[in-house]
Image (tube, rainbow, N blue to C red):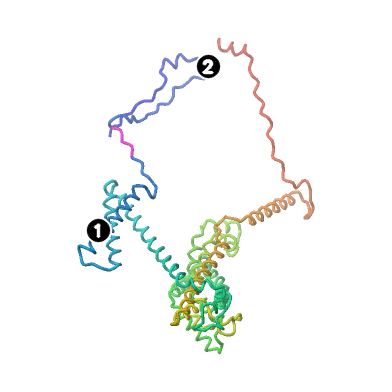
């Protein structure tokens, strides 16, 4: 391939010779070769691609394709073919929408861009479908349970003085809220230390036994909740204990533990090994490295692991039914007597044929969702900061510790006893450089004489 190159403009030989001979000999400037873009053989500049996720033309294509797909499917269902059914209508409409959007995009874009646009549309469609399912469940639950949520007694009373035929102005679910908080608190107290310590063992001490434990944890992840409830119930019957909230918390712990261990194990593996190696190089032991380097770095991920385990345990019904029973009154003692939870209370209300009890069941489910959101927000506020992100209080504490360390080091260097204050320990003032003195200028006569020579 032949390139047309032009030599950059440089001073000629005569111009160099005519220049005044002051100082050392002047060398010609280096030659720079450039490509002439006006020549026909020069490569055409590649058009710049837009990195924007959504453009105006894409929105127009989406709207046009959607409207055309709905119209074509409506024509097929109502005029052309004997088709019926909402699910079939939606599926055919979505397929036609993808086809038309791909054709419209192919008119102006190349093949890789068309594939990228199609993949983006499919991913956004799946995300929209998941959000639609989530909001449908939330809106339907709150819509059916809105009537009992309007009574203040629903949040301040239990069901000891209310029956199936009573109106909504009597009875509440406060006993279920208290039972849920007690059970999940005991389960978290048991799960968090065991789960995180097991994850640390799997990460920091690999070996045959660690592989065996990891396999057992992965198998327990798919353990049915009824099996965990039966296991704890068998222990209760074997040793002669009664049903209680503590027994239900143990069953919930069995369900939460593999989730927390598996999630925490994945998070701890993501901690850079260079941080651990740096701590080991400074002489820190394994547990010191884990406590001061690994866990603070993975704190946000460990919080997420605890949240996932809590989400699994707080919605369990069958283990609580087998191990704690059901009750309609308050029970603040988790070691004696039956205790109920919000999911079990929801199940008890909904299975009743009375409309008021069914409405109470949906209201209880709404209270459960609100309680879960509050617990998640509290957990995220406690451990949601990423590695290296300090709160204002932590920043002040670190600054105070740094000043104390600096004072101790200076006292050690100067041989001053601990507890004494001296002006010598004050941080040194920054050194001010002396003002720059200009070099003495040569006499004018000597310069003229050198020029004449």
Q: Residue 72 got which mark?
A: 1
Does residue 184 belong to the magenta stretch? no
The foreground one among 215 and 132 is 132
**Residue at disc 2, secondary structure:** loop
User: Mark 1–mark 2 contact, CB under 8 Å?
Assistant: no
Asked if one can make out residue 330 in the rendered structure from this viewpoint, the answer is: yes
Task: Please name the residue shown 65% across and 56% down the image.
Answer: 393
Q: x, y (%) of residue 50?
A: 37, 45
Q: x, y (%) of residue 297?
A: 55, 59
- Few, some or many residues within 10 Å of mark 1 (<14, 14–19, 20+): some
Q: x, y (%) of residue 283?
A: 61, 59
1 vs 2, front mark: 1
Which range is magenta? Answer: 41-46
Sequence-first disc among 1 and 2: 2
Task: Name the residue that disc number 2 marks.
Answer: 22
Task: Please name the residue shown 44% across and 67% down the image.
Answer: 139
Asked if one can make out residue 309 in the rendered structure from this viewpoint, the answer is: no
The foreground one among 307 and 124 is 124
Q: Residue 155 got which mark?
A: none
The foreground one among 241 and 443 is 241
Say whether residue 139 is left or right of residue 103.
right
Location of residue 414 with respect to 347 vertically, above or below: above
Location of residue 67 with respect to 187 vertically, above or below: above
**Residue at disc 1, secondary structure:** helix
Say whether residue 33 is left or right of residue 229.
left
């Amino acid at each position: 391939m032949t390139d047309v190159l032009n030599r950059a403009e440089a001073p000629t030989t005569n111009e160099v010779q005519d220049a005044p001979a002051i100082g050392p000999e002047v060398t010609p400037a280096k030659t720079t070769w450039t490509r002439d873009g006006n020549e026909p053989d020069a490569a055409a500049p590649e058009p710049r691609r837009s990195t924007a996720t959504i453009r105006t033309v894409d929105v127009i294509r989406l709207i046009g394709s959607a409207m055309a797909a709905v119209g074509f499917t409506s024509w097929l269902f109502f005029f052309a073919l004997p088709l019926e059914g909402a699910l079939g209508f939606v599926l055919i409409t979505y397929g036609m929408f993808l086809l038309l959007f791909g054709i419209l995009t192919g008119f102006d874009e190349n093949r890789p861009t068309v594939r990228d646009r199609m993949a983006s549309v499919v991913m956004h469609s799946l995300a929209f479908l998941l959000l639609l399912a989530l909001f449908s469940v939330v809106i339907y639950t709150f819509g059916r349970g809105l009537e009992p949520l309007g009574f203040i007694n629903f949040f301040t009373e239990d069901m000891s003085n209310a029956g199936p035929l009573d109106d909504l102005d009597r009875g509440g679910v406060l006993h279920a809220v208290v039972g849920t908080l007690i059970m999940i608190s005991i389960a978290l107290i048991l799960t968090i230390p065991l789960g995180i310590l097991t994850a640390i063992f799997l990460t920091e001490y690999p070996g045959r036994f660690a592989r065996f434990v990891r396999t057992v944890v992965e198998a327990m992840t798919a353990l049915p909740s009824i099996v965990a409830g039966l296991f704890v119930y068998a222990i209760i019957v074997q040793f002669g204990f009664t049903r209680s909230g503590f027994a239900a918390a143990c069953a919930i712990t069995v369900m939460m533990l593999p989730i927390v261990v598996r999630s925490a194990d994945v998070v701890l593996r993501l901690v850079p090994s260079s941080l651990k190696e740096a701590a080991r190089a400074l002489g820190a032991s394994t547990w010191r490295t884990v406590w001061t380097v690994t866990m603070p770095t993975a704190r946000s991920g460990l919080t997420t692991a605890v949240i996932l385990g809590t989400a699994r345990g707080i919605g369990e019904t069958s283990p609580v039914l087998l191990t704690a029973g059901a009750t309609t009154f308050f029970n603040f003692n988790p070691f004696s007597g039956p205790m109920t939870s919000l999911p079990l209370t929801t199940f008890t209300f909904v299975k009743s044929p009375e409309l008021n009890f069914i409405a109470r069941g949906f209201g209880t489910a709404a209270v459960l969702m609100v309680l879960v959101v509050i617990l998640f927000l509290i957990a995220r506020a406690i451990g949601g900061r990423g590695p290296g992100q300090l709160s204002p209080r932590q920043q002040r504490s670190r600054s105070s510790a740094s000043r104390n360390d600096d004072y101790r080091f200076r006292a050690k260097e100067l041989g001053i006893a601990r507890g004494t204050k001296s002006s010598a320990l004050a941080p040194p003032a920054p050194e001010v450089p002396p003002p720059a003195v200009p070099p003495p200028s040569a006499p004018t006569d000597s310069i003229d004489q050198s020029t004449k020579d």
